[in-house]
Image (cartoon, rainbow, N blue to C red):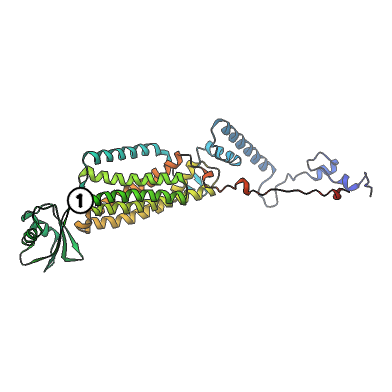
Amino acid sequence: MAIDKNNPLEQNNPDRNGSGGSNTDASSTRRRKKPRRDGKGSNNQAKSKKARRGNSGDNAAQTLSTQAIDPNLDIGDAEDYAAAQAEGGIKAVGDQRIIPFMKIEKPMALLSLLMVIGSIIAIAVNGLNLGLDFTGGVSADVRYEQPVEQVEVVQALADGGFDDAVVQYLGTRKELLVRLPPQSDNVDGLNASLTQALTLPDNAADISNVNIIGSQVGNEVYLNSVMALALALVCMLGYVALRFQFKLSLGAVLSLFHDAIVTIGVFALFGFPFDLTVLAAILALIGYSLNDTIVVYDRIRENFRRVRGISPRQTIDLSLTETLRRTIMTISTVLLVVLAMMFLGGDGLYWFSVALFIGLLAGTYSSTYIASSIPLRMGLSRDDFIVKVKPEFEEEIVTFNDPKMYE
């Protein structure tokens, strides 16, 4: 069917750009200059808003040309990032204000390096004041007729010629475990000497078992302890690498090594006794510090996938800010329990609590700066958390042209 060139519909339909059509049609498409019915403004206000947007766009373009933009950002997010930098940097995302933790990462890294070097020097020069579990000695199970205090038993042993004794309760205040340095007497003579020294006025002591631990057994315990620490760190490295990313796993292991070496260094510096209870505290500290680090890493991964238009440094600052309240609540409740054990738990739990107290402070610090700043220095970005489709799994678009369809 032929199409009429003088179609009235074509003549009455004005061009969208305003170039086509008659003057009558152009006047009919003009915008209203009067205020809107809802009273929200006029065209003059709209023009002023457009002018302000144009000025802000020029400022953003100027900032893009003068400041370096993170290459990891998308092209569409670069303008937002430049506008934020023009305002002094992104200070908030949504209703969440960002605390710039990574602004002082370099001084904190220097402080951590000095603490680790100082701890290694203290361990090498002073050595550890190893307890009887590592050096060997004598252990005896003692039962009294009446409840006794640990201080009374230690004083009685010192008066009997047994110095540096360690006394612990075994369930009740009548049953105790007494540990002594290596003695020269045999088992029979040592049993008689201990019975005489442990007997208190109006309170007889009964020794049920005496064990002599040699130095060879102590050395084996010491080597097994070092291997346990090393194995724990290696397992943590593999877990975080599989659970998150290798860059994060390296930061987590270095932070755990920092916590353990600083705690051991403090014990070496001040000569505190280092026994199996302190070793248990360090192993418990590794588990606690890793748990705190995993919470931070989970939020970092989530924000890298969720939030766009900000740099990796700002993403880590946002993640640390969001987990700050949880960190404060956790460390506060744990420190209350540790301080209660330190001042109310007796001699058996004192050094265990001291080791936990030192390690908790170091672990909270390392989870914020060491575990987060090291992956950032290794180039952590959003691409590390996005699953990319391999080329062999991409769908191939196949087009089929039927020659008959053009006939």
| Residue 345 rendering spot, x and y as whole percentages | 22, 59
- The amino acid on which the numbered mark 1 sits, given as a three-letter code, is Gln
Asked whether, in this view, residue 284 is left or right of residue 396, the answer is: left
Residue 72 visible within the image:
yes
Residue 369 visible within the image:
no
Residue located 35% across and 53% down the image: 287
Q: Nearer the viewer, residue 160 or 98?
A: 160
Residue located 27% across and 46% down the image: 264
- Extreme-bottom residue of the structure: 145
Q: Nearer the viewer, residue 49 or 173?
A: 173
| SS class, disc 1 | helix
Asked whether, in this view, residue 289 is left or right of residue 53, the answer is: left
Name the residue that disc number 1 marks: 216
| Residue 201 rendering spot, x and y as whole percentages | 5, 64
Above or below, 43 against 183 in this view is above
| Residue 153 rendering spot, x and y as whole percentages | 11, 59
